[in-house]
Image (cartoon, helix red, strand yellow):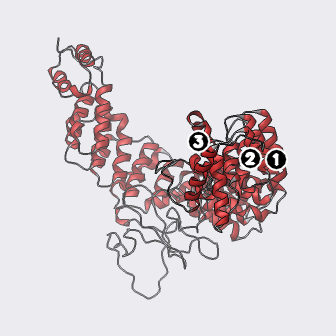
Amino acid sequence: MGDVGGLAESVGAQRASDAPLREVRAVTESTVERLASGVPLGDVLDVGAAGSWTDLDVEVRAVARYRPGLLPGLAWVEGRSGLTVSSLIAAAVGRLRRERGAENAVESVEPLLALALCHPDGRVRGAALARAREYPDLLPLIVVRAADWAEPVRETARELLRDVLDVDAAVSLAPLIMLVGRRGRGDVGVRLLGEVLRRAPGERLGPLYGSADRTVRRFAHRLAVAEGFLSPAEPARAAAQDGDAVIQDLCAEAALKTVSADVGDDVLRPLLTARNPRARSSGVTALRRAGRAAEAERFLTDRSAVVRACARYVVRQLGKDPLPLYRAWCSELGPEAGGERQTGRAREPEPATGQAREPETGHARKPGPETGQTARQPKLELGQSREPERDTGHAREPKPDTGQAREPEPETGHVREPESGQGPERGSFVPVPGAVIGLAECGERADAVLLWPLLAHPVPAVRARAVAGLRLLDVVEADRLRPLLDDPAPGVVREAGLALLPSAPELPADWLMERLGGRPRHVRVAAFRLLSAGSGIVPLRAAVELLEDPDPKLRVWAEQAVQRWHPPAGLPSGEAEVEALLDRCTHLFSSYVLRRRKWEAGVGR
């Protein structure tokens, strides 16, 4: 024991002076080794991260398999004999730090007790729980042990957790409790967390609403909604700003329950100006309950289908039919409109003012210097900004949220409501893609006559929605839509390819094959999809053509298409072209599969 004590003094001196302990560990030491040598928990673990404690629990059990002497034993935990090298080193570290006046110079019991709480022997874990009450920094490991697989350890940890868990500890440990709660025996900790937080004032849950952990945010919002901790405006802001779909639905429904005729803009405005369609649709639905159903007309052209459907419902409750509005809007959207239109009512003659009216040129309005868009955008309010939209042919989708609160951003799918909360002023402009697809959603096949001219509209998003509308109305004519496969906007080509897919076998294969080489990527993708839906040898021919495509994704798709291809029933046996194409794909098959595929095609025999 004297030799061991001398080694402990030597190692402890080096640890106290922060010198590297090359004699007992490698340069890159594990967490368990550092704790066994007496390093405080805060210097080893990220104590604020829930995963650090569960990782420590796993690592200690792994180390115990090949270095059991590194962990404290039952005798040490109970205060009896049974000194180990690690316990002697830890004691030496604490003693030398006290002698040198180091900060936090205490006996290095806490790091060893943390290892004991993770020990693979249940008797050691149970004995360590009895001493853990004296060390508040070990409370996270008590949470872990409350879901222990050994019933005596589990019950002891749960009783201890009930005694020491207060509001402050519950808020700080909520991420760890929810993480452990996913285990088969972790539900007790979650229930205990709920009991503690229900007794706390509502404002104490504030840090949990903005937690980076999505599970914690969901738990906190469910608890706050159930207990009535939130004011009417708070769930509305949470539904608009949080990036989690579950929280959006939960808080939007909670906000709807508080809406009445005397509700203010502090509830409706966050919902109506939210980026996510769940919150916007809830806000539109709430307009009727708030006695402001007339404002729902502005949302008939929203970029989201669910918001448009809610707006049509509210408008119909007023006794109005939205279909004539859509027809009137789309009739004003010809190619000469340049992507602009009025508020949604039929255009009325303007009274004479004695001033000369600016002549109409039939050309698109010159893009503004900031947005670069054809249609003039509504004026933003002070302190708000507009993000530029790319010319893709589709309405811009919102970027995924990170769960952090942020200010509502201006909408691009409908007119921004003015300060008064009333409808748009006369003469304001509304983005048009939502009007086009809205006509198809509630219109008849005869309404296609309004959509065909929009295929030549200067705004790509309008052209894309027009193609989608024709597909919804089931009035697709392949000869008239086929030229759109060469459209410069990817969104238009994507919609055109989807609309033409049922007619793919009738499309000229040679014309589509020309678009597999030297064309933009979106054109090549659409042509390949249409050719893949063809019959006979056409899908194989298209896939082999793309095996050397510059785009790696297209090459992978082509390789998979070649490997999936089998000779169809109507293909003549012994086609020489099939053999030539398969010979170009030898790297994709084993010799047996290649022979089998040629045998199926009646070649190479």
Residue at numbered disc 1: 160
Q: Give whichever of 187, 328 is nearer the camera.
A: 187
Residue type, mark 3 in image: Glu
Q: Nearer the viewer, residue 157 or 367?
A: 157
Q: Which residue is mark 2?
A: 142
With 530 as the anchor, is 70 left or right in this view? Answer: right
- Marks 1 and 2 sit apart, C-alpha to C-alpha, by 8 Å
Q: Position of residue 314 (x, y in %)?
A: 65, 56
Q: Most extreme residue toward the bottom, as rendered? A: 354
Which badge, 2 or 3, comes first in the chain's sequence? 3
In the rendered image, residue 101, in percent from the top left (x then y), is placed at 66, 69
Classify residue 152 as left or right of residue 480: right
Q: Earlier in the sequence, mark 3 or mark 1?
A: 3
Q: Dot 3 corresponds to which residue? A: 59
Helix, strand or loop status at disc 1: helix
Q: Quadrant of the N terminus?
A: top right
Label 3: state its secondary structure: helix
Percent coordinates x, y for residue 204 in the rendering: 76, 63
Counting other residues with Cα less than 10 Å from the Cα at mark 1, is it few (<14), some (14-19), or many (20 or more)? some
